[in-house]
Amino acid sequence: MAQISMVEAINLAQAWELQNDPDMVVLGEDVGVNGGVFRATSGLQQRFGAQRVFDTPLAEGLIAGVSVALAAQGLKPVAEIQFMGFIYPALDQIASHMARLRNRTRGRITCPLVLRMPHGGGIHAPEHHSESLETLLCHHPGLRVLCPSSPQRAYGMLLGAIRSPDPVMFLEPVRLYRLARQEVQDDGQALPIDRCFRLRNGDDVTLLSWGAMTVEAMKAAERLAKENIQCDVLDVASLAPIDFDSILDSVVKTGRLVIAHEAVRTCGVGAEIAATVAEHALYDLRAPVRRVTGYDTIMPLYRLENEYLPGVERIVDAVRATLVDG
Amino acid sequence: MAQISMVEAINLAQAWELQNDPDMVVLGEDVGVNGGVFRATSGLQQRFGAQRVFDTPLAEGLIAGVSVALAAQGLKPVAEIQFMGFIYPALDQIASHMARLRNRTRGRITCPLVLRMPHGGGIHAPEHHSESLETLLCHHPGLRVLCPSSPQRAYGMLLGAIRSPDPVMFLEPVRLYRLARQEVQDDGQALPIDRCFRLRNGDDVTLLSWGAMTVEAMKAAERLAKENIQCDVLDVASLAPIDFDSILDSVVKTGRLVIAHEAVRTCGVGAEIAATVAEHALYDLRAPVRRVTGYDTIMPLYRLENEYLPGVERIVDAVRATLVDG
Amino acid sequence: MKGGTIVADFSVPYLQLLDADGRLTGPLPSLADNPQEWLAMYRMMVRTRLFDTKAVNLQRTGKLGTYPPCLGQEAVHVGVGAALLPQDVVFPVYREIGTKFWRGVTLRDVLLYWGGDERGTHYVNTPQDFPFCVPIASQMPHAAGAALAFKLRGEARCALGYIGDGGTSQGAFYEAINFAGARGLPLVTVVVNNQYAISAPVRVQTACETLAQKGIAAGMRCLQIDGNDLLAVRVAVGEAAERARRGDGPTLIEALTYRLSDHTTSDDASRYRDAEEVTAARAREPMVRMRRFLEERKLWSDAQEAAWRAECSAEIEAAVQEYLTTPRQPVDSMFDHVYAELPRSLEWQREEARRFSGRR
Amino acid sequence: MKGGTIVADFSVPYLQLLDADGRLTGPLPSLADNPQEWLAMYRMMVRTRLFDTKAVNLQRTGKLGTYPPCLGQEAVHVGVGAALLPQDVVFPVYREIGTKFWRGVTLRDVLLYWGGDERGTHYVNTPQDFPFCVPIASQMPHAAGAALAFKLRGEARCALGYIGDGGTSQGAFYEAINFAGARGLPLVTVVVNNQYAISAPVRVQTACETLAQKGIAAGMRCLQIDGNDLLAVRVAVGEAAERARRGDGPTLIEALTYRLSDHTTSDDASRYRDAEEVTAARAREPMVRMRRFLEERKLWSDAQEAAWRAECSAEIEAAVQEYLTTPRQPVDSMFDHVYAELPRSLEWQREEARRFSGRR
Ligand SMILES: Cc1ncc(C[n+]2csc(CCOP(=O)(O)OP(=O)(O)O)c2C)c(N)n1
Ligand SMILES: Cc1ncc(C[n+]2csc(CCOP(=O)(O)OP(=O)(O)O)c2C)c(N)n1
Ligand SMILES: [Mg+2]
Ligand SMILES: [Mg+2]
């Protein structure tokens, strides 16, 4: 088993499924010869041909709309949106058709497909290249929204996504693409796409995050462990629908909850989790749920990026506050 | 003072400002000769001419993008999006430019404008004509998002919106357009656009809603009053930024909170309010915050519309549950 | 512009076969030289118009929701229907019931849909056709996508995408035809130019002298036709579909017609257009001329007309009864098709919906 | 298509004034017959290229963020700059620094922007010009909107919208030009066809033989020019701008050029194109021919070239120093420009940001 990066894992998962599912096609901007601007589709066109892995014109709405019909026609499109900040032109197709076609036709026409997209900041990218817009997707019933945080989970969850009968939005944290390498078995095994993953066991505080923030959360948990504060760290991973059973189990155990995400605070997925937890486990909560999030401002250009993105310090501080509070 | 409907109030406010602000222009689909599909701009083109009130091609992205530049050029565009369900093609302009231009240019170029749009269901309209998508806007810092719930507030808040230096999304509940008439003084007085409005005073439970749901909330409050349950009913009105001061004051007083909105539950504005209240007033809460919302499903075609939209029964039930809970 | 040479040249042809008086303007192409089909098409136009009239009445009496009539546009819709094969796939907007009926969609289905019931999208006879599409132009990328699927699989099929004159202002329309051009996809685009987008006349949408020329920007074959001429529609769409199926690429057809009705039953067209204009347009409507054409050839008579109308009316009446007596879907139906399987987190919401069902 | 007549005819003219060897292809229109301007434009091309090279180096040494070079496209950008008046407004994409410099944007501003600092959009000398626009094609509706503002106010100004070959696939591009056509707006659209959108050659985008013909779908005047010919750019854009300012409507100009560099400093163009292709393109690049043209007329010499380069290099060096020594904005700056006034709900967030500033 090789040590591979997340972007390699994503590449492998696509290759596996292209090999095994003749209906799968890969499309998007620069996914062909260039192999994607992050190389997530590198070599796939060479290996599977331009009939199955191909570049589209520069139009995200088109990519999404064409994918809807490819899926309706029984193909399995796995399309790349080059950066999540460029999802807007595709939102009409995502919201009005992907999320609804099954419901609209009472199941006659369905839309199983995957939209992959780099997510989040931290790589000093230009404007609009660092957005975390999961809320825009999670607010649309009918979609599944995933965000893996390790090479292994990326591999398994992507396979799960491709095999899902539902349309799946697959958010890939750019900061993790090459951050760490991990042994990943290229065995075609899918991971569940409706579950949290527990990254660390602890009894004092539940610490929830996803994507690149899981790395900050784990660092925070390690730091806090030295003060004898034990965090139960969960990678939410499936942002819609959310696995509230696991989250509530953990909160009932710890009585405290901190949520960390990069996205803007207002109406972020953290708000939904905090609201649901406070609704279902209010009497188990020993302190207010704290959210450590991007501010309600515009993600700044890169010189101030690290002032904007939640980091270890803010998470540690929130966890400590939670313990002081209650 | 005449008794007028909300749609007439909206018409009057635009006429007032067109009369007094030579830079204001009205644009959108069918806003000219036809006066808008709900007649919100009826007679304006006749009165102010086709230079100031004009039809655009059928393209919401264009309407939004053109408005950005009109505003940057010192005009004051008040544009209509025919239904909120058709906001998607405009979201790129709204999120990438309206919300950001001031920040991007450190204040050099600003974007004061109003996008008006019918909001919500309840009139047995076709598919996509009944959406409540405020979350998509509230999640974008830089925008103000308003939703009036009476002719008077519509008049005053629309004037406030037009005079605001910020881009304002003005959501008009279709169900209220002609539901009730009210005396409205056509005096050009703006109302604040950063405040809640208290619709009823009570000490037992805080009941928050906006748009057409305020009518259901008020009916619920009246029903509950007969059981001697006194609701503090607030029309949130300004959905972004939210007036949390008023909300927290009320919750501290009542110790209980029920939020009713038409939009999908997950990541709805109700989630943000619930999360923020539970964060800042956890120890004042005597029961879990309850949300009465649209389900996490697709707004059904109209035969089941009333099964989907939250109504008096569900609100009453939630308030009662809040009292039993705590 | 001094020093200029010409690097590209284009022209937009126009096709009319049957003039407003029902006279042929020239020899009939073999594609349309089929008396059996003339009759079938004419009958379908009559059936469609009778249904359309009934649907408007149902709405007026509170028995149907907002409904977009197709009065005056039947030739486009029926001609398209006749030009396609069952394996082709249609991507409609919301007005093209003539095409749907031709392809076997039932009258009841259409009533159910505009009656606020999702089951109206069932289409047992044409299971791959897309349902009505309300967000303007968003169906066009689907049409291009299906055409891509056919091409990738090497199937001799075409996708037919409808778009209105108003719809040609939306970016999605251009993106789709541009893509179809770039990949040489088997896509036939029919721009139904009925002169209005709700209240906006075509000149609000564009300065173009034809909407057909939008195809030039997509690098595709394009033409304009008399859309009230059933035979021209049949020929132009038939040729385009055949080219598409045999791999000769996409075509864009602008069909000139006129919306004789209000935009929908919620609209009042007298607010924005003159009675004279409508009267003039009525003289060019599609059914009279086709009837004359048939009558002159002794293929149709007043008696046949009366009999066929009676037959259609009875069928429509039966469908209306069926529609009106169809019980609403259970409240669970809101949850049944959001995902392939109901997620855990939706279970309690379904419980809540059940609990309050019928108790507002 | 039998029975067809032609209802519309179009052609796309092409303009080149200076060939790749620096020879005039015909008489010079008076618009471009201005030796002083030739020199100013040539100098600006040199200045732009020297800056561009420096910026790439800064990125390579970690002193600048991702940067999109303009190597080989200077003639389009500088020619556009020279063709415009100060009261016109430019809506760029991200590569057009030649235009910005011409209009008085400082070198430091451009460095600041790509150096991750919003203050790089300040543009004191051209306060209405829009900053770079990253979401492809979304600037085009702005250009149309500004043109509408000029028309509504009766001002003799034009808006200039830039778009890349890749950008012509986005719906927003078509929506904007279609609107400009419909309203006869003073909009000049320059399609910079540099043959690639990152790795995708033009044929991935479209089947069109020219991108100029996109203008036909917008009902507007359109032409194709040699975009590496500074004089052709100056003339074509100048004429289009004059027409626009005097109310004669919009023009779309396709400028043929070639991106000699990588797409950005994050890109590796050798992955998707041959060295030979680049070599062939280099022979057609814009600066050499303009220098020859000037030298032949004794307007420029090696000595002048050397002196000018030295002057530019010194200026660039100074700007780089200024840029490198510009302190970052305070953390408060994230909050200062979200709204005209800081909302109450953002106050405590600003507190939090201050508290953690510099403590990650
Ligand atoms: C994206 C979007 N915007 C607005 C509307 C509202 N609307 C419904 S039909 C229509 C006009 C369509 O005109 P056209 O394309 O010419 O088709 P026609 O109705 O004439 O058949 C409008 C604006 C919509 N359905 N979708
Ligand atoms: C909406 C959107 N999608 C994708 C991108 C990523 N992207 C940046 S530049 C580019 C290619 C642009 O090509 P072209 O329009 O030809 O301009 P050029 O870079 O050649 O100047 C892409 C795909 C983007 N910036 N915006
Ligand atoms: Mg129309
Ligand atoms: Mg390019």
Image: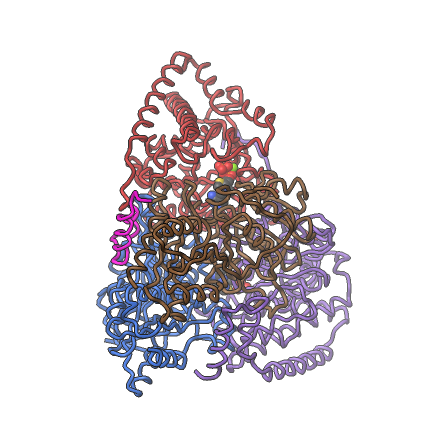
Chain colours: A brown, B blue, C purple, D red
Q: Nearer the viewer, residue A269 or D241?
A: A269
Residue A276, how many percent across, how many down?
41, 67
Q: Quadrant of residue B181?
A: bottom left
Task: Answer above or below: position of A89 versus A30.
Answer: below
Residue at the (40%, 56%) spot, across then down: A231
Residue D358 shown in magenta? yes
Q: Is C286 placed left or right of A295 in the picture? A: right
The answer to whether residue D164 of the structure is visible from this angle is no
Residue at the (78%, 68%) spot, across then down: C36
Residue A286, how many percent across, how many down?
33, 66
Task: Answer above or below: position of B281 versus A172.
Answer: below
Q: Nearer the viewer, residue B34 or D21?
A: D21
Q: Is B94 placed left or right of D211 in the picture? A: left
Residue C207 shown in magenta? no
What is the magenta range?
D334-360
Q: Is A297 placed left or right of A100 in the picture? A: left
Task: Give the position of the C terminus of chain C as an image quadrant.
Answer: bottom left
